[in-house]
């Protein structure tokens, strides 16, 4: 079935990738904050996990905005509108000067096509939405909206807060970028458990490691608070983990709010934002990350999603260590901090599963969703 994902628009590249990796899409269509792709109906429910998506629609048709009224008037609505219905029009980008038909006008076209039409503006059985993007209109029927409130899960709302912890949306998105459907998620720098909480709430077993027992205890309390019981937590140096990892999702310590032990010469030193060697901190951190990647070569047998500070130029470290970067994305946090999200694997074959093309021909849609009129041709 062709599904239309209404992306949240905070960071289109990241939100589109989240969908692409979660559904292992080989082809997709992306315009503005709409992504359309063929998704097996069995898998469509996975979309509830998405962090940066507002709603999921079964795709009905798209057309030039100037032909929207004609498309509505000729589409066969019997299948799409069983029971009560409602039409909504959303403008997603600056208007291009043309006026969209009103919701009332569009609803009128549906009304005239149905045998026993009934409108319900509050709780319709079929919510039909026309999204206007520039001079194009995308029309879909709502399958479900996605709860993006993350209520009570922001770092300061958890029983055990910590300034280094990720916000739930980003943590959730990182988990989805790994493409995991089943299996367990491991965070080797778990801190107070930001990533583990989101993965656990998706129903995935989680494993966390942290150098500090106080952080491990915070993670334990937080996980239990959110009703997550399938987890294992260990106080352990990330450079010394022994288990094989299939889905690694983590945010490395930057030595700013989270301290990290690094080697200076032969001596271990505790690195923090106030480290006294100007310009030296990142050199020592890169050395720490290099050693981490060398260690991961032995333990990673799947996909890793890791955030590094951009200053660390982790792309070089990854290629020197023999990893294949599937996707990289830079996010600016504030004036002096940007971070790079990397999705990578060790094996070339595993990297293949993420290959995708932005070349989806919406014209060749399934019989179920193909518009039945020439007025609703898709380009
Ligand atoms: C950026 S925080 C992790 C935040 C966490 N992902 C979250 O969202 O709540 C980094 C964590 O790495 C831990 N850490 C630092 N050095 C470590 C090491 N060598 N091994 C394991 N954990 C380490 C710190 O104690 C800190 O809790």
Image (cartoon, rainbow, N blue to C red):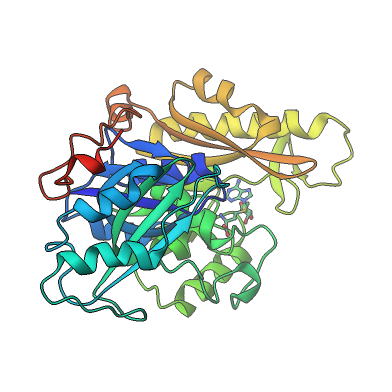
Q: Residue at x 23, y 64 (%)?
A: 110
Task: Locate residue 345 relative to residue 39 in the image: left or right.
Answer: right
Can residue 203 be seen at all in this image of the molecule? no
Give the image quarter of residue 370: top left
> Is 211 situated above or below 109?
above
> What is the total number of numbered labels drawn onto the structure image?
0
Task: Locate residue 167 relative to residue 164 in the image: left or right.
Answer: left
Give the image quarter of residue 364: top left
Q: Residue at x 32, y 22 (%)?
A: 348
> Is 154 situated above or below 167?
below
Q: Residue furthest top?
A: 320
- Give percent across and percent down for residue 356: 32, 29
Q: Residue at x 19, y 51 (%)?
A: 74
- Give percent across and percent down for residue 179: 33, 45
Give the image quarter of residue 72: bottom left
Which is nearer the eye, 314 or 42? 42
Q: Residue at x 47, y 54 (%)?
A: 52
Can residue 61 be seen at all in this image of the molecule? yes
Which is nearer the eye, 346 or 142? 142
- Give percent across and percent down for residue 78: 12, 63
> Is 341 situated above or below 95?
above
Q: Which image quarter holds the C terminus?
A: top left
- Give percent across and percent down for residue 213: 59, 64
């Amino acid at each position: 079935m062709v599904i239309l994902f209404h992306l949240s628009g905070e960071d289109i590249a990241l939100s589109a990738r989240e969908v692409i990796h979660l559904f292992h899409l080989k082809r997709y269509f992306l315009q503005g904050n709409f992504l359309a792709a063929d998704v097996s109906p069995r898998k469509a429910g996975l979309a509830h996990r998405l962090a940066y998506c507002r709603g999921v629609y079964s795709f009905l048709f798209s057309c030039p905005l100037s032909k929207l009224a004609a498309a509505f008037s000729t589409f066969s609505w019997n299948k799409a509108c069983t029971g009560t219905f409602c039409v909504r029009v959303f403008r997603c980008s600056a208007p291009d000067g043309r006026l969209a038909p009103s919701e009332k006008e569009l609803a009128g076209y549906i009304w005239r096509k149905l045998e026993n039409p009934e409108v319900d503006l509050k709780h319709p059985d079929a919510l039909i939405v026309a999204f206007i993007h520039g001079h194009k209109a995308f029309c879909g029927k709502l399958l479900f909206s996605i709860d993006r409130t993350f209520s009570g899960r922001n770092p300061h709302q958890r029983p055990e807060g910590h300034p280094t912890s990720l916000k739930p949306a980003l943590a959730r998105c990182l988990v989805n970028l790994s493409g995991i459907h089943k299996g367990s998620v491991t965070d080797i720098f778990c801190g107070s458990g930001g990533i583990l909480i989101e993965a656990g709430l998706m129903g995935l077993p989680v494993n966390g490691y942290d150098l500090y027992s106080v952080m491990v205890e915070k993670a334990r309390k937080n996980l239990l608070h959110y009703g997550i019981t399938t987890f294992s937590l260990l106080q352990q140096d990330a450079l010394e983990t022994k288990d094989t990892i299939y889905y690694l999702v983590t945010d490395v310590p930057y030595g700013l709010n989270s301290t990290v032990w690094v080697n200076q010469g032969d001596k271990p030193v505790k690195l923090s934002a106030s480290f006294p060697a100007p310009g030296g901190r990142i050199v020592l951190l890169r050395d720490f990350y290099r050693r981490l990647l060398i260690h991961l070569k032995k333990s990673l047998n799947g996909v890793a999603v890791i955030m590094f500070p951009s200053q660390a130029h982790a792309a070089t470290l990854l290629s020197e260590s023999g990893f294949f970067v599937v996707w990289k994305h830079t996010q600016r946090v504030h004036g002096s901090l940007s971070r790079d999200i990397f999705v990578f694997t060790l094996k070339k074959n595993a990297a293949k599963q993420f290959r995708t093309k932005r070349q989806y021909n919406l014209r060749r849609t399934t019989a179920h969703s193909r518009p039945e009129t020439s007025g609703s041709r898709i380009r």
